[in-house]
Amino acid sequence: MTTKNAIKVLIADDHAIVREGLKQILADTRDIVVSGHAENGSEAIRLSREGPCDVLLLDISMPDRSGIEVLKQVRKESPKIAILMLSMHREDQYAIRSLKAGAAGYLNKQSAPAELVTAIRQVAAGRKYISAALAQELANQINDNHETPLHETLSDREYQTLTMIASGKTVSDIAAELVLSVKTISMYRSRLLQKMKLRHNAELTHYAIKNHLVD
């Protein structure tokens, strides 16, 4: 297959080591070429506009904008690009949110070496890609008759704030990591506590651990 006909992949991850690792996995694949890389969400959006790009490998935790926000923006501007979300989080934490937002697939970075090439080929062909673990999780949700968990009522930013607080980060830590004001993060915290009928961070953390939202 010529480079012209190969699947063109844009890698968006803020860690240089991860980007290089993904490139190495794809280096010996004749039908896939890396057309560029981005270090943050804004750069990923810009490069997806400029092309050429068939598949965007997008880290869900970007320094300037959340991966979900980038996903929605790219889907709006470049709907032909298949977006494969990458994350260190377990599938049941962010995968379903990503798929609902328009992702073509979701891949845990730990399983990337074994599944990345297959996943890229599948989403480039217009199909969805989910791991066996996520397929089981979706099946369990379909079979369960219980009410929607409270954390699924949260917005993407509220959910992200929840998991970061439950991981031990302060409001100031989160604001610095997401490049947002402390006031904004405090607002997300207040909203999620209200929606989930929780009183403080200790109850929030207990809920997150009980529902396996943090490792």
Image: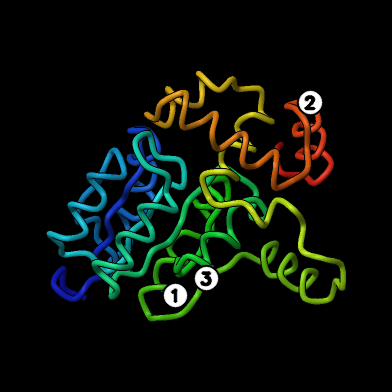
Q: Are marks 2 and 3 in contact (CB under 8 Å)?
A: no
Count neighbours of disc 1 (C-alpha within 10 A) and say few if under 14, some if 14 to 19, many if 20 or more: some
Residue 204 location (% of width, % of height): 75, 34
Relative depth, front residue between 150 and 140: 150
Helix, strand or loop under label 3: loop
| Residue at 46% across, 25% down | 175
Count neighbours of disc 3 (C-alpha within 10 A) and say few if under 14, some if 14 to 19, many if 20 or more: many
Residue where numbered disc 2 is placed: 202
Where, quadrant-wise, is the N terminus in this rendering?
bottom left
Q: Which mark is residue 129?
A: 3
- Up-down relation of residue 126 to residue 84 (above or below): below
Q: Earlier in the sequence, mark 1 or mark 3?
A: 1
Say what amino acid the circle numbered 1 marks: Gln
- Between the C-alphas of marks 1 and 3, the distance is 6 Å
Helix, strand or loop under label 2: helix
Residue where numbered disc 1 is placed: 122
- Residue 10 lies in quadrant: bottom left
| Residue at 60% across, 62% down | 96
Say what amino acid the circle numbered 3 marks: Tyr
Residue 151 placement, left or right of 73 = right
Q: Are marks 1 and 3 in contact (CB under 8 Å)?
A: yes
| Total residue callouts | 3
Residue 138 location (% of width, % of height): 71, 70
Say what amino acid the circle numbered 2 marks: Ala
| Residue at 57% across, 45% down | 110
- Up-down relation of residue 121 to residue 19 (above or below): below
- Up-down relation of residue 65 to residue 129 (above or below): above
